[in-house]
Amino acid sequence: MFQHSSENPLSDCFIGWLTGTLLWKLDLSHNALSGGLPLSFSNLTGLGILDLSVNNLSGTIPDFLFYGFRHARVISLAANMFTGYLPTSLGSCMKLTSLNVSSNNFQGFIPSILGRLMLLENMSLQRNNFSGLIPGSFGSLLSLRVLNMGYNQLSGSLPLQLSQLSYLEELLLSNNCLSGEVPADIVYLPSLQTLDLSFNVLAGQLPFYGGNCMLLQNVNLAGNNFQGAIPTALNTCSYLISVNLSSNQLSSFLPPEIGQLRDLMSLDVSSNNLGGRIPVEIGGLSGLILLRLANNLIDGVIPPQIGHLGALEVLDLSDLKLQGSIPSALRSCTSLITLYVFLFLLTPFLLLCFFIDKQSAYCIVLVLMSVEQLLPA
């Protein structure tokens, strides 16, 4: 392995020395390699594993460079400074199971020819400057388990062909410019565990209709333009651990059925147009660690059932229309670290705002003392 230095070019001489060997694995990751990829790389046709991640490599990659990599199983170019277009020759690496080009400066369309890689299980293209549509050919990647294309400039709608990926466990497309409605068949993929479509411009109703999504654990649809009510069918995804629906245009109310998600640890529906009251059924979420309802139209009182949330660490009820007093049952939330509430007390013209943050133990003591005085005996 090369030693760390500020300037350590990857030379044709070095690659030429390797040419003709039976080299199967070349791991030069986590060094300070700089410059571009030598053309002689195309001669390393026996490679099964190529890892050049976490270096300072730059420049464009010749389109033909990987045509001879017939035996390649793993290619990682992640965390470098490569520019230009992704080489279409990667589509000829028919035995590839993992492709990682994340955290570079690749641009242009994602080559549709990558849809030929039938053995591919992991494709990580996140944190580049890819634009254009998600190739419909990706629906042919029937072995795919992880597809990460977040933090790019992809546009258009989600191709329905993705609903054919029956082994897909993680679909990560956050921070793009994707639009249109989300096909419900994608949400209900039989192996899907994590769905992150946050911070796009997706619209329409939330794509939950009551089908079988028994493995789904993490859903992040924050920062879109979803409208309408939170579907009661969300409770059919009984293994959900984290749900983030914040910063949309959701209306109606928080459905009582949410209390049936017994494994839920994080629920964020802040910054919507939800009204009604906080459902008492929320007290059934005994494993809940984070609850954010802030910046909605929710009114009424804080239900004492929140005191049943013994694992709760973060509770954000700010910018609501709550009234009344703080329920004494809140004392039972012994794990609470952060509490943020704007509360209109029954005393006229008195607005209570308090905040607890574990960054300052002294501050916690002071605020808890104030809360203790406000709680009924």
Image (cartoon, helix red, strand yellow):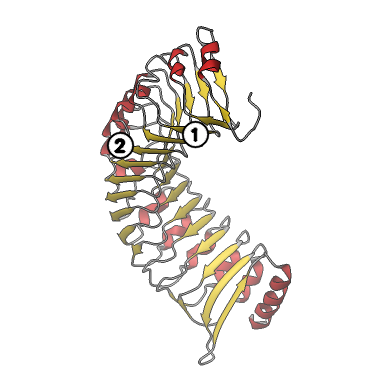
The span from disc 2 to disc 1 (Cα, nearest Å) is 18 Å
Q: Is residue 11 above or below residue 168?
A: above
Please tell me whether mark 1 sits on a helix, a strand or a loop: loop
Can residue 183 be seen from the camera position used here? no
Quarter of the image that includes the N terminus: top right
Q: Nearer the viewer, residue 145 or 166?
A: 145
Name the image quarter holding residue 288.
bottom right
Quarter of the image that includes the C terminus: bottom right
Residue at left offset 33%, top offset 25%: 88
Q: Which mark is residue 285?
A: none
On the image, numbered disc 2 is attached to which residue? 109
On the image, numbered disc 1 is attached to which residue? 78
Left-right relation of 229 to 246: left
Q: Where in the figure is residue 42, as x and y percent of width and height? A: 43, 16
Residue at left offset 70%, top offset 67%: 360
Can residue 346 be seen from the camera position used here? yes
Q: Nearer the viewer, residue 35 or 302?
A: 35
Left-right relation of 363 to 312: right
Q: Where in the figure is residue 357, as x and y percent of width and height? A: 64, 67
Please tell me whether mark 2 sits on a helix, a strand or a loop: loop
Give the residue type that dot 2 points to: Phe
Give the residue type that dot 1 points to: Ala
Name the image quarter holding residue 110.
top left
